Image (spheres, grey):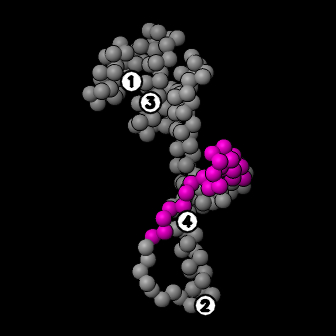
Amino acid sequence: MLSQASAASGSGQKEQAVTLWKKAAEAYPADKSPWLSIAQTRYEAGQYGDAIVNAQEVLVRDPNDTLANSIIAISGLRLSTRSLADLSRQNNLSGSIRTESQDLAKLLRESLGETVLVPPAPAPVQQAATPPRGKAGKKAQAKAKQEDDSSANPFGALK
């Protein structure tokens, strides 16, 4: 079953491969390899929630599996990044969610040994133009910069 699933996956028939891996998992419940293959396939397809669920099945069978732990960590971060970006766009990142997000971002920075969780996007090349003068011009420039920062960096609100 595993070789049939691998052949199906190699030929691009991912869903057929997942079906075969699930059958193999039923037939050999102590074997982690079908679950790991499913988790990897879901991760590669950008189906991070499913990747996490299947990687957790691997960890039930082998709590020290590095690949399963990696899939869970990276998939979780990608889901979090998407959600935070959506919340940031909607300006709904507030209260305890904001505080907890800031704490998690701090923990991630410390774990990675980085001062910034997501590197800033390169500044867009701007044509030479005369900037507006006075207080209104400064406010407009500050607002434009803030909008650029938040769209390029989903963690911008957490700094």
User: Whole-percent x and y of residue 62?
Assistant: 57, 18
Give the Cα separation between the discs numbered 4 and 2: 23 Å
Residue 134 badge: 2
Residue 40 badge: 3
Crowd band around label 2 with a 10 angstrom C-alpha radius: few (<14), some (14–19), many (20+)? few
Q: Write down the residue under mark 4.
A: 149
For the view shown, which residue lies furthest in the bottom direction?
A: 133
Q: Is residue 3 visible?
A: yes
User: Whole-percent x and y of residue 6?
Assistant: 34, 21
Tag 3: amino acid: Gln
Instruction: Identify the magenta region.
Output: 99-124
Give the Cα separation between the discs numbered 2 and 1: 62 Å
Q: Which marked residue is nearer to the observer: mark 1 or mark 3? A: 3
Q: Are the residues at dot 4 and dot 2 in contact (C-beta closer than 8 Å)?
A: no
Residue 95's place in the image compared with 58, above or below, is below
State yes or no: residue 73 in magenta: no
Give the Cα separation between the discs numbered 2 and 3: 56 Å
Residue 144 appears left or right of 100: left
Earlier sequence position, callout 2 versus callout 1: 1
The total of numbered circles placed on residues is 4
Crowd band around label 1 with a 10 angstrom C-alpha radius: few (<14), some (14–19), many (20+)? many
